[in-house]
């Protein structure tokens, strides 16, 4: 019984210590560039992959909505370059209220924008977080099994 409680406590402690990293892993990223008279870009979660469902809205300097489109199954979007003066604010709205913003300056529109982001893939931190959750679940299973066995003995 004591071993199960220690395993449960260690797993929960590991999961709680890593919870701050897990919350930041759910932050969406939005990237865009101007190419061939269009705003093209992608929506993704670093280390997790592309966003498959979401809406990208383009706002002008005054906060007026200039254009709106959906991301495709690869997390990409393309929309005709809106008329008006930059900067343009692109807003990604995804499921569960998740949101990301990207501001395109005049330099970005001229082709001097930042390089395309790279997807980091599977990270060591996500593996450690998963192991912590796994250990916590194993500890919980041991605890519940011992609790069940104690109650069973009391009934006999």
Image (spheres, rainbow, N blue to C red):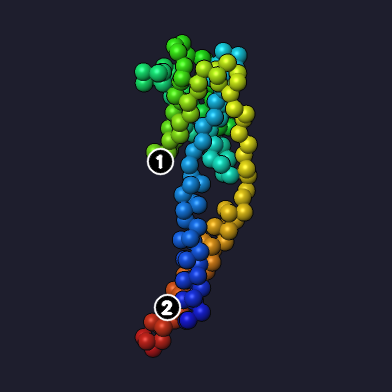
Q: Residues within 10 Å of mark 2 (few under 14, many from 20)?
A: few
Counting from the top left corner in percent of width and height, residue 111 is at 60, 18
User: Real-space Cα distance between discs 2 and 1?
Assistant: 37 Å
The residue drawn where x is 36% and y is 21% is 63
Q: Is residue 117 left or right of residue 93?
A: right
The residue drawn where x is 49% and y is 76% is 6
- Name the quadrant containing residue 39: top right
- Name the quadrant containing residue 147: bottom left
Q: Is residue 68 visible?
A: no
Pointer 2: what residue?
A: 148
Pointer 1: what residue?
A: 96
- Closer to the eye: label 2 or 1: 1
Rendered view: 109 above or below 152: above
The residue drawn where x is 51% and y is 64% is 14
Counting from the top left corner in percent of width and height, residue 35 is at 60, 17
Rendered image: mark on residue 25: none
- Name the quadrant containing residue 44: top right
Counting from the top left corner in percent of width and height, residue 71 is at 51, 28
Precedes in sequence: disc 2 or disc 1: 1
Along the viewing direction, whichever of 123 and 1 lies nearer the viewer: 123
Q: Is residue 73 left or right of residue 95?
A: right
The residue drawn where x is 51% and y is 32% is 30
| Helix, strand or loop at mark 1 | helix
Q: Is residue 53 visible?
A: yes
Residue found at the very far bottom of the displayed protein: 156
| Helix, strand or loop at mark 2 | helix
Rendered view: 139 above or below 122: below
């Amino acid at each position: 019984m004591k071993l199960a409680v220690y395993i449960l406590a260690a797993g929960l402690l590991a999961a709680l210590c890593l919870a701050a990293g897990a919350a930041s892993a759910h932050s969406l990223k939005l990237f865009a560039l101007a190419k061939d008279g269009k705003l093209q870009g992608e929506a993704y979660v670093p280390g997790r992959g592309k966003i498959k469902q979401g809406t990208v809205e383009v706002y002008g300097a005054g906060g007026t909505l200039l254009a709106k489109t959906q991301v495709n199954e690869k997390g990409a979007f393309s929309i005709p370059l809106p008329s008006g003066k930059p900067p343009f604010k692109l807003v990604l709205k995804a499921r569960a209220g998740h949101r990301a913003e990207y501001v395109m300056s005049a330099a970005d529109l001229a082709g001097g924008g930042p390089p395309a982001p790279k997807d980091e893939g599977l990270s060591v931190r996500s593996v450690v977080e998963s192991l912590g959750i796994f250990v916590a679940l194993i500890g919980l299973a041991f605890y519940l099994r011992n609790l069940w066995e104690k109650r069973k003995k009391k009934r006999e």
